[in-house]
Amino acid sequence: MIQEYSSMRASDPLHRRPRAGARLAAMAVALAAAAAPFAARPDSPLGGFSAAGSAREASLEGRFDTLLSAADLREWMAHLAAEPNHVGSPHDRSNAEYVAALARSWGWTTRIA
């Protein structure tokens, strides 16, 4: 009976690591618990900023967020992920030119090396 179970486990991918999901869940909970003390609090300054600097940075980031458009982000991602992007491929070059054109349209100076 033990021999049959052992051979079944080796051939059935669902029985290879029966506790892997539980381990992953436990790791996720432990990571969340460890990170909780470092979570940003609305009343505390951002790390590396004074209270006044933190307020200015939060204001700047808020203005930046208002400039983002979900439709634009979807369009850019669709273009960038349309084909495989391995180094040196034609689509890799196309993506570089696409991003450079976007940056130029925002007033940046670009050069593709």
Image: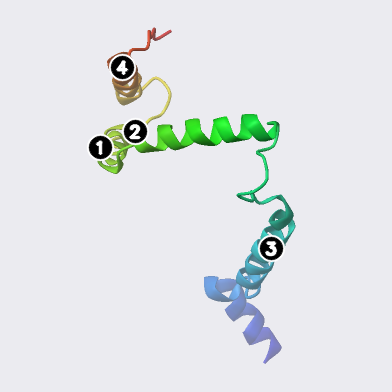
**Kind of residue at disc 1:** Glu
**Helix, strand or loop status at disc 4:** helix
Residue 71 % position (x, y):
25, 41
Read off the residue under disc 1: 75
> Given contact means CB atoms under 8 Å apart, are the residues at marks 3 and 4 in contact?
no
**Residue 15: numbered disc:** none
Read off the residue under disc 3: 27
Does 97 appear above or below 49?
above
Q: Is residue 74 left or right of residue 33?
A: left
**Residue 67: numbered disc:** 2
Type of colouring = rainbow
Give the residue drawn at x 64%, y 31%.
52
**Helix, strand or loop status at disc 1:** helix
Give the residue drawn at x 36%, y 37%.
66
The earlier-in-sequence mark between 3 and 4 is: 3
**Kind of residue at disc 2:** Leu
**Residue 97: numbered disc:** 4
The residue nearer to you, when weighing 58 against 19, is 58
**Kind of residue at disc 4:** Glu
How packed is label 3: few (under 14 Cα within 10 Å), some, or many (20 or more)?
A: few
Give the residue drawn at x 30%, y 25%.
91
Instruction: Specify whether residue 65 is in view.
Output: yes
Real-space Cα separation, disc 2 to disc 1, in angstroms:
15 Å
